[in-house]
Amino acid sequence: QQQVRQSPQSLTVWEGETAILNCSYEDSTFDYFPWYWQFPRESPALLIAIRPVSNKKEDGRFTIFFNKREKKLSLHITDSQPGDSATYFCAASEVVGQLTFGRGTRLQVYA
Amino acid sequence: GGIITQTPKFLIGQEGQKLTLKCQQNFNHDTMYWYRQDSGKGLRLIYYSITENDLQKGDLSEGYDASREKKSSFSLTVTSAQKNEMAVFLCASRPDWGARGQNTLYFGAGTRLSVL
């Protein structure tokens, strides 16, 4: 059973639109939720992360919205740019545990 | 800053062959990881190690061995390559407990495996 689920599997938006990537998790002991992005032929790298002490984390055009009761979170990318085209992985762990990754959402932003 | 170096970048093997992938990091991190990435399946943990000579199995450890003989290096062995197998193996390390960014994984460039 997947501990971390992502949807959609792929997403296409036009430049300037807001892309919304969804994530849900099973384990209520998870309390650290990073998003990694991976460009074609490159390695994953940390984009932004949140802990459940807050329900929102913002970094420029990237915002995580977190709903602890429903065990859901989402990554919003406002004013999407072609350079944002990548695969986005949601992950989760306990404070000192190992990360469990979702299967990823492939985002394509067209100019 | 530091770097994680994986060798080789590309690995072509034969069915049933034992194949070894190597990883070196100069971050001086205690914890190192091996992940397997298949298209559409995300990153799955094979083995990790929290210190020299420590080994911990991940969800995908069957068919693999690992070795952490020194802090800076972590190797992974595919014990018997499967025909038509294609995957990317990613090595990663993490800052130590209490350090800034302690839960951030830093990845190497990967080893791309193809089995004929």
Image (tube, coloured by chain):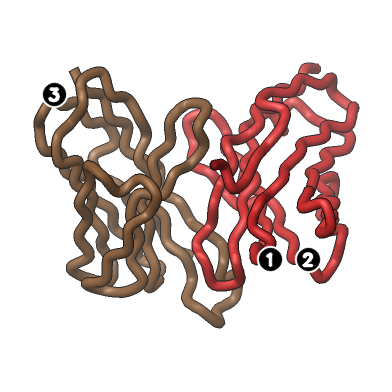
Query: Label 2 crowding class (10 Å Cα cut-off): few <14, some 14-19, many 20+?
Result: few
C-alpha separation, residue under disc 2 versus residue under disc 1: 6 Å
C-alpha separation, residue under disc 2 versus residue under disc 3: 46 Å
Closer to the camera, B108 or B33?
B33
**Label 3 residue SS:** loop
Residue B28 in view (yes/no): no
Residue A31, numbered label: 1
Report x, y in % for residue A56: 87, 58
**Identity, as a three-letter code, of the amino acid under mark 3:** Glu
Residue B102 in view (yes/no): yes
Residue at which label 2 appears: A52
Report x, y in % for residue B32: 37, 62
Residue B15, numbered label: 3
Q: Residue furthest left?
A: B17
**Label 1 residue SS:** loop
Residue at the image position 33 percent from the left and 66 percent from the top: B49
In the rendered view of the protein, which quadrant contains the C terminus of chain B? top left
Q: Quadrant of residue B60?
A: top left
* Colour used to depict chain B in the structure image: brown
Closer to the camera, B33 or B10?
B33
Asked if badges 2 and 3 are on one and the same chain, I answer no
Residue at the image position 43 percent from the left and 36 percent from the top: B37
Asked if badges 2 and 1 are on one and the same chain, I answer yes
Circle nearer the N terminus (2, 1): 1
Q: Is residue A106 above or below residue A64?
A: above
Q: Quadrant of residue A18?
A: top right
* Colour used to depict chain A in the structure image: red
Residue at the image position 80 percent from the left and 17 percent from the top: A111
Closer to the camera, A1 or A9?
A1
